[in-house]
Image: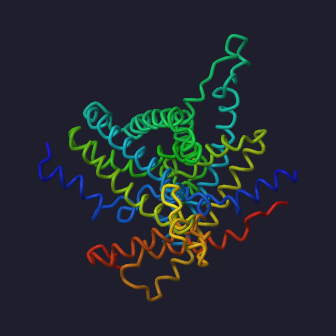
Amino acid sequence: MFSARNLKLLTGPIGKDNPITIQVLGICSALAVTAKLEPAIVMALSVTMVIAVSNVVVAAMRKFIPDRIRIIVQLVVIATMVILVDQFLKAYAFDVSKQLSVFVGLIITNCIIMGRLEAFAMANKPWPAFIDGLGNGAGYGIILIVVAFFREFLGSGTIFGYPVMEKLGLYSIGYENNGMMILPPMALIIVGLIIWYQRSKDKTLIENK
Amino acid sequence: MENLLNIFIKSIFVDNMVFAFFLGMCSYLAVSKTVKTSMGLGLAVIFVLFITVPVNFMIEKYVLKNGAMIWLGEGMGDVDLSFLTFMVFIAVIAAIVQLVEMIIEKFSSSLYNSLGIFLPLIAVNCAILGASLFMQEREYENVIEATVFGLGSGVGWLLAIVGIAAIREKLKYSNIPDPLKGLGITFILTGLMAIGFMGFMGIKL
């Protein structure tokens, strides 16, 4: 079940093979939902769910999918999963679903999912495909959560809505929230800094130009 | 007329697809190495948005919305297909991209040769699906408004990708710390450009 190879599928995408910072996939929907921690976590879970399940479905069907129409088959599988997630969120977490607005629907065109289906699920058995989906979902989720943590903490002074800065009494000695953090540009800059950090820790990742 | 101009300007500058919503980032980062190719992709995106947004608008209005199928007869008045939105939108986009590709190939091979490679890529560009979903969320009143919105979003996307490509061409000659080279600096630059675009916030004609 958890052989060394499968374990590597799980841990690879979290570090050296990260979908966002190394493979540059799925950035579209990643950044817009990171102004607060809660929607970021919901988004990470939704994407992980969609990748893992559609990986399993496509891996199970891989021998029956004609090569020429595989893209459309993959899109249908993904769209079905996304509709399920969307309806589930609307039913059980309506507020978060409103905050995520169109970005739940945009999971369909998230390049990570198409990328994993094409590169992995079409050539592997369902179980490794499931692990691979979980790993990539987790790699994606970690970046989302790190970015959201900094943006919420520095931008609103809260963590999960709990007013940390206020409880520490920093406002009374003149501390101000950095409103810039909540605006879209800072998400890009924070991801840029994460990439900088990761590549200076691991020199093999540096792009040669 | 004023309203249309307002939607157009707003979708280019204020609600820019790349800088305000991060849509289409994947191809934005991958293709923005030279100005020429990014111009080609940008034009293709404008073209596809210009067609898909109004088509999806009509489908939404006459098929998918709650009670939209009343024109088929009284009995169809309470059919609600809105849960199928994602599936229908993405299918329409994939079909139109394919169609556009075939039409261009037939009638203008020079345009096909310059856009050709980018067209299939566009089907999975989040900016296209994103524009359709925003069109649905913002509830534009008629198909002309939706078309103008589609066109404006495309122009905004073109501006963004050509801008970053021009900067990246110059960037080759600058001395950037090694770990920041390539992807890292592109992210930070996009952030800075987005801060610039925030200056347009609140513009209303």
Identity of the residue drawn at 51% across and 77% down = B168
Residue B158 position in % (x across, y down): 62, 63
- The answer to whether residue A111 shows anywhere in this view is yes
- The answer to whether residue B163 shows anywhere in this view is no
Residue A139 position in % (x across, y down): 34, 57
Q: Quadrant of the N terminus of chain A?
A: top left
Identity of the residue drawn at 37% across and 46% down = A48
Q: Quadrant of the C terminus of chain A?
A: bottom left
Identity of the residue drawn at 68% across and 37% down = B57
Q: Splitting the image into 4 quarters, where does residue A72 fall?
A: top left
> In the shown orientation, is residue A168 left or right of residue B197?
left
Q: Splitting the image into 4 quarters, where does residue B43 fall?
A: bottom right
Q: Closer to the camera, A110 or B38?
A: A110
Relative to B87, residue B40 above or below: below
> In the shown orientation, is residue B153 left or right of residue A169?
right
Relative to A6, residue B87 above or below: above
Q: Splitting the image into 4 quarters, where does residue B138 fall?
A: top right
Residue B53 position in % (x across, y down): 66, 43
Q: Closer to the camera, B26 or A26?
A: A26
Extreme residue in the top direction = B75
> In the shown orientation, is residue B101 left or right of residue B64?
left
Residue A98 position in % (x across, y down): 59, 43
Relative to B66, residue B24 above or below: below
Q: Closer to the camera, B59 or A69?
A: B59
Q: Closer to the camera, B61 or B50?
A: B61
Identity of the residue drawn at 31% across and 36% down = A58
Extreme residue in the left direction = A3
